[in-house]
Image: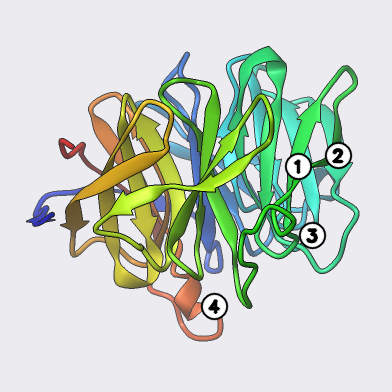
């Protein structure tokens, strides 16, 4: 593993004094990126041309908070509601609400989303030891895998967080923020196994983004991006690079946009203090694995 310092980064400013953005998803059709506010649920659009605008205001459709934001292959935007326990799904084209779902349990922290075959969405919760599955027409959400029953140690703090579909498309990989561990989940059986991560663990791991076999990991409290080379099924990986940049400010999420990474500067460590304004998304050249 080696350290890489990136000197040059592009900044995109988000309007608002208390945004605390948490996640980001890119529409592969247009290259536009969508960002959610953990503080009030505002959804922003960062156009591929660089302009930033409010896509859906705070409070719309009873949306009070947004953690994970993802765009699926079917033209829908998904917004995980964090401590509100909700998942909102929208048409990207016109912004119409398709579904508003609730995981039901409290306390909860509905955190991130990954998409598998057949229109299925897999949803993490950082406080409830379950993976959720959303599918159907109309969309519904239900518990899918009991993580504690499968031996995942469920500790205090934030547990399962970022989640992606593996290169082989038959498994998921999710990270566990408080312990820095990574877990592989079989789409066919729901079986959970720990990822053998060379040069791990990665405490404070947060949002994930996958490009080919290269997994990018936001390491929030350390102000780093970890670069991990994954096997096709996600059963093992190696941390190859730790990326630092002076523009990082508690990065919680990453998205791949063509040849660059878009990194969310959440500043969640400043929620009870005075954050640096404006809140920003950082664009930087995508480091090699």
Task: Answer whether labels 2 and 1 touch (C-beta < 8 Å).
Answer: yes
Q: CA distance from mark 4 to mark 3?
A: 17 Å
Q: CA distance from mark 1 to mark 3?
A: 15 Å
Q: Residues within 10 Å of mark 1 (few under 14, many from 20)?
A: many
Mark on residue 132?
1
First in sequence: mark 4 vs mark 1? 1
Q: For this rendering, which residue is in front, 175 or 100?
A: 175
Percent x, y for residue 14? 45, 52
The residue that disc 4 covers is: 271
Task: State which mark lies toward you, 4 or 2.
Answer: 2
Q: Name the element at disc 3.
A: loop
Q: Name the element at disc 1.
A: strand
In the rendered view, tell whether residue 46 sits above or below residue 36: above
Q: CA distance from mark 2 to mark 1?
A: 5 Å
Percent x, y for residue 121? 69, 30
Task: Answer whether labels 3 and 2 touch (C-beta < 8 Å).
Answer: no
Q: For this rendering, which residue is in front, 153 or 3?
A: 153
Q: Residues within 10 Å of mark 4 (few under 14, many from 20)?
A: few
Relative placement, left or right, of 270 versus 189 is: left
Q: For this rendering, which residue is in front, 8 or 156?
A: 156
Relative placement, left or right, of 282 versus 62 is: left
Task: Answer whether labels 4 and 3 touch (C-beta < 8 Å).
Answer: no
Q: CA distance from mark 3 to mark 2?
A: 16 Å
Identify the residue at image location x=45%, y=29%.
166
Identify the residue at image location x=63%, y=27%.
187
The residue that disc 2 covers is: 142
Which quarter of the image is occupied by the C terminus? top left
């Amino acid at each position: 593993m080696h350290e890489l310092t990136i000197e040059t980064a592009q900044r995109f400013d988000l309007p608002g004094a208390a945004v605390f953005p948490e996640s980001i998803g890119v529409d592969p059709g247009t290259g536009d990126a969508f960002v959610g506010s953990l503080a009030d649920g505002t959804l922003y659009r960062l156009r591929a041309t660089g302009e930033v605008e409010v896509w859906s205001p705070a409070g719309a459709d009873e949306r009070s908070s947004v953690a994970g934001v993802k765009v699926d292959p079917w033209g829908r935007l998904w917004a995980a509601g964090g401590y509100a326990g909700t998942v909102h799904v929208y048409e990207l084209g016109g912004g119409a609400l398709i579904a508003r779902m609730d995981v039901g349990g409290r306390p909860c922290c509905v955190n991130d989303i990954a998409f598998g075959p057949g229109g299925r969405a897999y949803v993490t919760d950082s406080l409830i030891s379950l993976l959720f599955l959303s599918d159907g027409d109309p969309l519904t959400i239900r518990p899918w895998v009991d993580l504690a029953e499968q031996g995942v140690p469920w500790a205090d703090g934030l547990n399962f967080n970022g989640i992606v579909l593996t290169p082989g498309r038959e498994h998921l990989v999710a990270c566990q923020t408080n312990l820095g561990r990574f877990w592989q989940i079989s789409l066919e059986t729901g079986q959970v196994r720990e990822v053998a991560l060379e040069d791990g663990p990665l405490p404070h791991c947060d949002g994930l983004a996958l490009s080919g076999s290269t997994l990018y990991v936001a390491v929030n409290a350390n102000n780093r991006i970890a670069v991990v080379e994954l096997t096709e099924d996600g059963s093992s990986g190696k941390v190859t690079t730790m990326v630092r940049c002076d523009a990082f400010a508690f990065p919680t999420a990453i998205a791949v946009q063509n040849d660059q990474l878009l990194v969310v500067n959440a500043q969640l460590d400043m929620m009870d203090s005075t954050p640096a304004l404006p809140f920003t998304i950082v664009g930087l050249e995508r480091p090699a694995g």
